[in-house]
Image: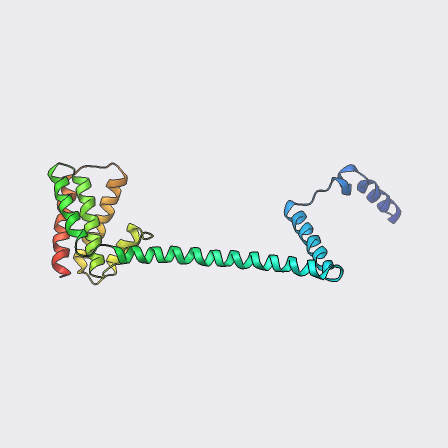
Amino acid sequence: MHDLSDTAVRKLTAEILSRPEFSPANYKLPSWVEWARRFRQWLEKIQLLRDSDPLLYWMVVGIVALVSTGLVAHMIWSLRIAMSASESFARDLPSGHSAPDLAREGRALAASGNYLEAAHCLMIASFHALADHSIIQLRPDRSNRWIRDAVRKSPLARGLADEIDALVLCTERRWFGGRENDPDIYAQWLSALERLSTEVK
């Protein structure tokens, strides 16, 4: 039977702790702990400057405050530029001319046998027609999925909204998939655009 006296336990513990793997020199702190420790030491040194060299202390505080203010101002400026670009894109969309031009381009493409490209033109023309009548808002950050959802929630006739929703999905799959050059998809878009032009007058 093993000796479990206090003396034996202390002796065994001392032997275990004396092994190399338990030496403090071999223990390495995680990098983030080491970084936090150094940062705290740096802050403590800065704090000591408040008494030993007040001028240098306030210079350091001023520089840090200035850099922080500059970073915040740059972030605000970048966000304002991005948002104003999106708004100006929506404002500058051609009104009244884009849909007919795209429709004419689509007919020309269909006449030359490029039915998928023609259908894509008519899809974009329908987006412009919807935007011109404030049914959706076109912005560069809005995907076809967002447009489909907006069309479904719009006051358009249920049948037409469902048709446009299905046509956008079908065209997108063909455009980014097998690129089947089927005249049927063009004919469907032509019909949908004509119905849309009639309904939103």
Farthest front residue? 55
Q: Is residue 7 left or right of residue 188?
A: right
Q: Is residue 131 above or below residue 35?
A: below
Residue 87 located left or right of residue 38: left
The residue nearer to you, when weighing 3 against 79, is: 79
The image shows residue 161, relative to residue 2, as above or below, that is below
Residue at left 40%, top 58%?
80
Say whether residue 71 is left or right of residue 181: right
Residue 91 sits above or below residue 13 on the image: below
Q: Position of residue 90 (x, y in %)?
A: 28, 57
Question: Which color scheme did the rendering employ for the protein?
Answer: rainbow
Q: Nearer the viewer, residue 107 or 143?
A: 107
- Where's residue 22, x and y in %? 76, 41
Identify which residue, 76 or 19, lies in the foreground. 76
Task: Give how far across and how far down residue 18 sits, in percent.
Answer: 82, 40
| Quarter of the image where the N terminus is located | top right
Quadrant in the rendering for residue 15: top right
- Give the residue at x 15% y 48%: 103
Residue 18 or 189: which is nearer the viewer?
189
Q: What residue is drawn where x is 74% and y is 39%?
A: 26
How many marks can you see? 0
Q: Give residue 161's quadrant in the image.
A: bottom left
Asked whether, in this view, residue 147 is left or right of residue 47, the answer is left
In what quadrant of the picture does the C terminus appear? bottom left
